[in-house]
Image: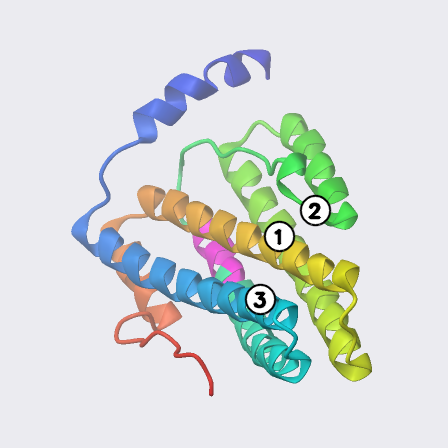
Amino acid sequence: MILARRNERKVRSDWEHLLSPDSEEVLTTAQGSVRDNTHLIGVTLSEATQIRKLGDLDEALRFLRIGTSVIEEFTPSLLALLGVMTKFSRMVSAMAPVDPLVPADFHLAELTNLAHLHRLLHQMIVSTRQRFRLRLFIIGKGVSITSHYLLAKIRNIVSRKTAAEQEWEQVERIGCDFSRLAEESVRSFRTLLEALSSDATKQLGEELMLRGRQPKSLPR
């Protein structure tokens, strides 16, 4: 175990290479889909906050409702992506080492604790494939937790029509946590593509129905 960890840095550098054209295409499409959705969530929450500060609470609440709709639609898709990644990770014989989540990157206490647990379990596992699947599992749990808290906070604000600064700041912070987890999902997706064969990459792209998918537009 000690020797394996000492060699991790070298192994990671050995795995850093250009993706094949097929992998680049799949990565670009998946990455764009995830980032479009997380950007949309970030924009609605940020706009809602700014509008509230200008004194138009009703319009701010409208933006929060838009954010709620996007979160509700995107969360299952992101969890499904993580599930498919777990499935395809069993098709590789070796892959680049992955890092555990960083507790300091999160605001929610539940996510900080989850990241600490991840770091502990990460040290107990030597196989890179097992570490990768552990990472996906932790990210998935984090996405579920964050989405639940974010939706609950937003609905609470909307139902009570509150303008309390502290509650709106909590929504912004949790939104940042959600974006962080989405970005960690993208990083994991790239790691998987680096390890998959060309045929497996094409199969992955077909299963995710990535080709031809259009980015979402801001609801009116």
The tag earlier along the polypeptide, 2 or 1, is 2
Q: How is the image coloured?
A: rainbow
Residue 114 at x, y percent in the picture? 72, 44
- Per the image, the residue denoted by label 3 is 50
> 30 or 20: nearer the eye?
30
> 213 or 193: nearer the eye?
213
Which of discs 2 and 3 lies nearer the camera? The answer is: 3
Pointer 2 with pointer 1, Cβ within 8 A = yes
Q: Quadrant of residue 56?
A: bottom right
- Per the image, the residue denoted by label 1 is 177
Residue furthest right in the image = 160
Residue furthest front in the image = 54
Residue 110 at x, y percent in the picture? 77, 49
What residue appears at the point 17 percent right and 52 percent down from the top-left corner? 21
Q: Residues within 10 Å of mark 1 (few under 14, many from 20)?
A: many
The tag earlier along the polypeptide, 3 or 1, is 3
- Per the image, the residue denoted by label 2 is 107
Q: Quadrant of residue 92?
A: top left
Residue furthest bottom in the image = 220
Residue 118 at x, y percent in the picture? 67, 38
Mark 1, secondary structure of its residue: helix
> Magenta residues?
82-89
Majority secondary structure of magenta residues: helix
The tag earlier along the polypeptide, 2 or 3, is 3
Type of amino acid under label 2: His
Left or right: 166 in relation to 61:
right
